[in-house]
Image (cartoon, helix red, strand yellow):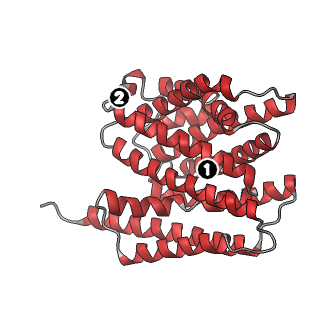
Amino acid sequence: MALLMLLRTSSRTGHDHTVVAIFARCVAALAMAGMSAFAKAAGKAGASPMEILFFRSALALPVVVIWVLLGPGLRALRPNRPSAHLSRALLGLTSMSIMFYALSLLSLADAITIFFIAPLIATCLSALLLGDKVGVHRWAAIGAGFLGVAVVMLPGSSHSALSLWGMSVAALGALLMAGVTITLRQLGQSEHEAATVFWFTVSGTVVMGCLYPFFFHPHGLSTWLLLVGVGCAGAVIQICTTTSLRLAPVSLTAPFDYTQLFWASLIGWLIWSDVPAISTIIGGCLIAGAGLYTLYRERLQRQAIMSMPPQ
């Protein structure tokens, strides 16, 4: 019922439902940590990243269709740039596969901490590829974020060769996810958000569905339930993130994404008895602080642009 209410709320325009937007973002963060935990457990039980990604897409598709029908309608699904949607799908599916693989190699807290470098990499790419102006404050924040990654990856008693490999895989996934962010910005200039969400979900379902027979493994009931959990959590993320973006500025709601670090640490401790290393805690604080400061500076920049008198 709560998700249906969010779906209906997301179809309204012209109102600043700030509280609902923040609540939706917090739920999305919890669902993201939950999906990561389901994916990690499924991977440990023998499910391949391709299988996990198929369930992530296929079970989210009906939710996306309902959201489209309740909100923008089928006309919004017409793609103006099909090739751009294809590029976004290939990049997105590759990054998600790599990130699911990283989850099988790392503790939940370590993996999600590394994933959070993606927004900082996206800021770098936006300066290099899109010509966005990035001032000294944001470059300093980006440097602090990368320092945080280096701290997390410091060799120590809790970091074996396998976990260092996993961190490298997670960093690659974050890099590709940053590329997805840049692609989404470009798509946003010509495509309705419903088209972007719908065609990516369809692409994931179709592509992974075609590949599924090659990666299929027989599983026990508990593993199938974990895969279903991945899909259901993915659907919750889809609803709540889209609702949040529609109801409030991303600069206001995005900071609540960092609650994932708390949930990931808690879930990892409860299920796998993983206690985050000191290096993970310090590095995570650096990455989160850098991300939050970057968002703050971007918000100031947008406010300055909006306050400029028309030419």
Residue depicted at x 46% and y 65%? 295
Q: Position of residue 100 (x, y in %)?
A: 66, 45
Q: Position of residue 183 (x, y in %)?
A: 40, 46
Residue furthest left as drawn:
311
Q: Position of residue 75 (x, y in %)?
A: 37, 22
Q: Residues within 10 Å of mark 1 (few under 14, many from 20)?
A: some
Number of the front mark, 2 or 1: 2
Q: Which quadrant would residue 63 be assigned to in this image?
A: top right
Residue 67 in view (yes/no): no
Looking at the rendering, in which quadrant would you find the C terminus?
bottom left
Q: Which quadrant would residue 270 be assigned to in this image?
A: bottom right
Q: Nearer the viewer, residue 301 or 93?
A: 93
User: In terms of secondary structure, where does tag 2 sit?
Assistant: loop
- Location of mark 1 (residue): 23
Q: How many marks?
A: 2
Residue depicted at x 52% and y 58%? 118
Q: CA distance from mark 2 to mark 1?
A: 31 Å
Q: Is residue 300 above or below residue 29?
A: below
Looking at marks 2 and 1 on the same chain, the residue that comes earlier in the sequence is marked by 1
Looking at the rendering, in which quadrant would you find the N terminus?
top right
Mark 2 in CB contact with mark 1 (< 8 angstroms): no
Residue depicted at x 57% and y 47%? 20
User: In terms of secondary structure, where does tag 1 sit?
Assistant: helix
Residue depicted at x 36% and y 41%? 187
- Location of mark 2 (residue): 79
